[in-house]
Image: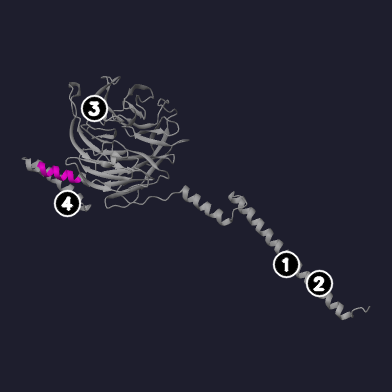
Amino acid sequence: MELPQMPELMGLSLLLGLLALVATAAVARGWLRAEEGTSGRSAGQKANGCPPDKSLKSKKQKLQQRIRKEKPQQHNFTHRLLAAALKSHSGNITCMDFSSNGKYLATCADDRTVRIWSTKDFLQREHRSMRANVELDHAILVRFSPDCRAFIVWLANGDTLRVFKMMKRDDGGYTFTATPEDFPKKHKAPIVNIGIADTGKFIMTASSDTTVLIWNLKGQVLSTINTNHMNNTYAAISPCSRFVASCGFTPDVKVWEVCFGKKGDFQEVVRAFELKGHSAAVHFFAFSNDSRRMASVSKDGTWKLWDTDVEYKKQQDPYLLRTGRFEEASTVPCRLALSPDAQVLALASGSSIHLYNTRRGEKEESFEQVHGECISDLSFDITGRLLASCGDRAVRLFHNTPGYRAVVEEMQALLKRASNESTRQRLQQQLTQAQEALKNLGALKK
């Protein structure tokens, strides 16, 4: 056998060595890439807490969806009569209350805060508010005390009342301090409303069974009322502080008088009168500022305005002044607000609001899809010039143009009968002011 020649042997060896080096480099590069991929996935999985079989793209999408879910977009609403939108809460607002002196508006939300707004800022560009924190709970109802130095809230989880005192600071702000002990738990069903009498003599709480409780300010129950409605949908104290009223499954509104002695000592609660005329359950009712008028809305698809300035002890019944149609009430629960002078009725169903002139019974304004959620509260300010509503994270304030029109109609009628010159001048001034307000809002009817 002949051996290969030396040059051919060396060439073959070099070729084999080069192939081995290329193969080794390729294996090494693949191993490094695999290591980098594994390391990157491990880091991503550790940071995001995702299972190993999910891609980075899938994790990023889920994270973005979670952020959007935690921070929903604010509902946008515009209207020519929208005066302002108060936006500071990070959760949905459940209740609001104007102070008796007209200086403040209190709002509570599920973000564990109560905010106190200055009403003089409502028509300004910026809306200031002061925050009170509700520790380890959140408030679903809020009411100012008559002296505006405190407010009470109903705790969502605690199912009881908590009192906050307002202490004014040197810089003009307030410090909010909760009292050491909450009221004792007495209700056995979800709460529907709370209130403080303007006299400061008692507090009312009502639950969705048939119970209305009258408390003193120290947290002691003075009286328990069984409404016999089968279930309560609403209850409230009259602005004059004499009466407590309730409505529910039955087609009436029941009114009681809370009686006190000459020395301010509690005596008893007695039945005063009833509003009878609806043919189905009553959703809601409201008092006028002087307690001489009441309005109600029922599942029978109607709203009614009543004259309650009666001598009930002489068996005198309230007078029905006006009945209007509101078909939405026959299918969904509704809320209403009555302007302080009882000239305008605001009805809310779902996220929409409708304003009626109570003298003629005609609808004059409608605001559709005002909030991103169902309207949770509705109220006129003490002047009657603004209507406030809440239902998402904002309070929206509307100019009450039907109220201005009612003033125009009333002043024109009074001017025709006025004989005294000074009276005529005063009436003419009020008429001119109302007409100017309507003109500035673009709502003056020709």
Determine crowd level at label 2: few under 14, some 14-19, many 20+ residues with C-alpha closer than 10 A.
few
The reply to whether the C-beta atoms of the residues labelled 1 and 4 are less than 8 Å apart is no
Q: Is residue 182 left or right of residue 147?
A: right
Q: CA distance from mark 4 to mark 3?
A: 39 Å
State which mark lies toward you, 4 or 3.
3
Q: Which residue is mark 4?
A: 445
Question: Where residue 418 sits: x, y (%)?
Answer: 7, 40
The residue that appears at 28% across and 42% down in the rendered structure is 328
The reply to whether the C-beta atoms of the residues labelled 4 and 3 are less than 8 Å apart is no
Q: Which residue is mark 2?
A: 17
State which mark lies toward you, 1 or 4.
1
Q: CA distance from mark 1 to mark 2?
A: 15 Å
* Identity, as a three-letter code, of the amino acid under mark 2: Gly
* Identity, as a three-letter code, of the amino acid under mark 4: Lys
Instruction: Give the residues drawn in magenta, as a range.
Output: 404-414
Q: CA distance from mark 4 to mark 2?
A: 101 Å
Determine crowd level at label 3: few under 14, some 14-19, many 20+ residues with C-alpha closer than 10 A.
some
